[in-house]
Structure formats: C-alpha cells, structure tokens
Image (cartoon, rainbow, N blue to C red):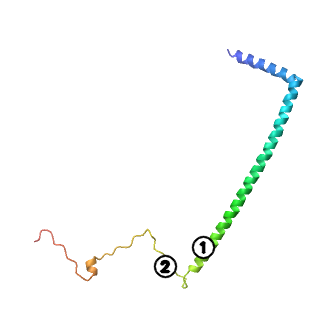
C-alpha cells in the first residue's frame, strides 16, 4: 500500500517536467509570472500610499488633540491663578461624599432643658 502514493507522485512529476520542457507552455508561464509581479508591485505601491496617507491623518489628528489639551491646561492654570485668595492659604473643600458630623448632645439638651432620665428597671 505505501508504494501507491510514491508511484502517483513519480508519474505526476514526469508529466510536469514534460509540460515544462514544452516551449509554448514555458513562455506562457513566464509571461503569467511577469504579469503577476507587475500587478503585485502596483498593489504594493497602492498599499504604501494608503499607509502613508493613514499615518499622515493620524499625525494631524494627534497634533490637533495636543493643541486642544495644551489650551485646556493653560485655561485651567489661568482660572486657578485667578481664583487663589489673597492670603495664599485655602481651607480644604468638604467632599460631597462625606456625611456631616452628628452632635453628641440631644436636641432637648441643646435647648437648655434637662434631659429626662429613663426610669430604672424594677422600680416603680
């Protein structure tokens, strides 16, 4: 059984060599190869141009974003300078997520009234 693939490959090789020795077929194969190379080089040029234009567009976009960010940073710096108080010291701003501190005193004690003591258990 393993000899059948060997014989088939040998026969195909013999046929391919005889066809390649044929002058007409050889000329057609060479012309087809030249056409493929020409089309390939044209495609390579188009691909190179597309890559160059894409990179140029990316560079332009990056420059516009860089300018916008610099203008934003300059504006924020100007606003910060204008908003600084004259003394130079600022109180830290309270965070919106912090809860206000609860007072330890009850509202009745805050109004000046003594707090009612709870009756002790077991006493009447």
Frontmost residue, 61 versus 5: 61
* Quadrant location, the C terminus: bottom left
* Occupied quadrant, residue 88: bottom right
Question: Would you say 42 lies left or right of 54 here?
Answer: right
Determine which residue is flagged by label 1: 76
Query: Which residue is the extreme one toward the left?
Result: 124
* Occupied quadrant, residue 121: bottom left
Frontmost residue, 60 versus 105: 60
Frontmost residue, 16 versus 60: 60
Residue at image point 48% right, 75% down: 93
Query: Which residue is the extreme one toward the bottom?
Result: 87
**Pointer 2 local density, CA inside 10 Å: few below 14, some 14–19, many at least 20:** few
Q: Secondary structure at mark 2?
A: loop
Determine which residue is flagged by label 2: 91
Picture layout, residue 97 above or below residue 54: below
Question: Would you say 98 lies left or right of 39 here?
Answer: left
Do labels 1 and 2 touch, CB within 8 Å?
no
Question: Would you say 33 lies left or right of 69 here?
Answer: right
Q: Total number of numbered labels?
A: 2
Frontmost residue, 54 versus 80: 54
Gap in Å between the C-alphas at discs 1 and 2? Answer: 20 Å
Residue at image point 70% right, 63% down: 63
Q: Secondary structure at mark 1?
A: helix
Residue at image point 12% right, 68% down: 122
Q: Position of residue 59 (x, y in %)?
A: 72, 59
Question: Would you say 9 lies left or right of 70 here?
Answer: right
């Amino acid at each position: 059984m393993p000899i059948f693939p060997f014989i088939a490959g040998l026969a195909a090789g013999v046929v391919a060599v005889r066809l390649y020795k044929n002058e007409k077929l050889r000329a057609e194969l060479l012309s087809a190869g030249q056409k493929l190379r020409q089309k390939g080089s044209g495609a390579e040029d188009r691909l190179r141009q597309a890559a160059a234009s894409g990179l140029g567009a990316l560079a332009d976009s990056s420059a516009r974003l860089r300018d916008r960010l610099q203008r934003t940073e300059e504006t924020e710096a100007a606003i910060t300078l204008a908003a600084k108080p004259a003394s130079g010291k600022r109180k830290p701003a309270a965070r919106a997520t912090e809860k206000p501190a609860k007072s330890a005193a009850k509202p009745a004690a805050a109004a000046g009234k003594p707090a009612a003591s709870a009756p002790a258990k077991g006493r009447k």
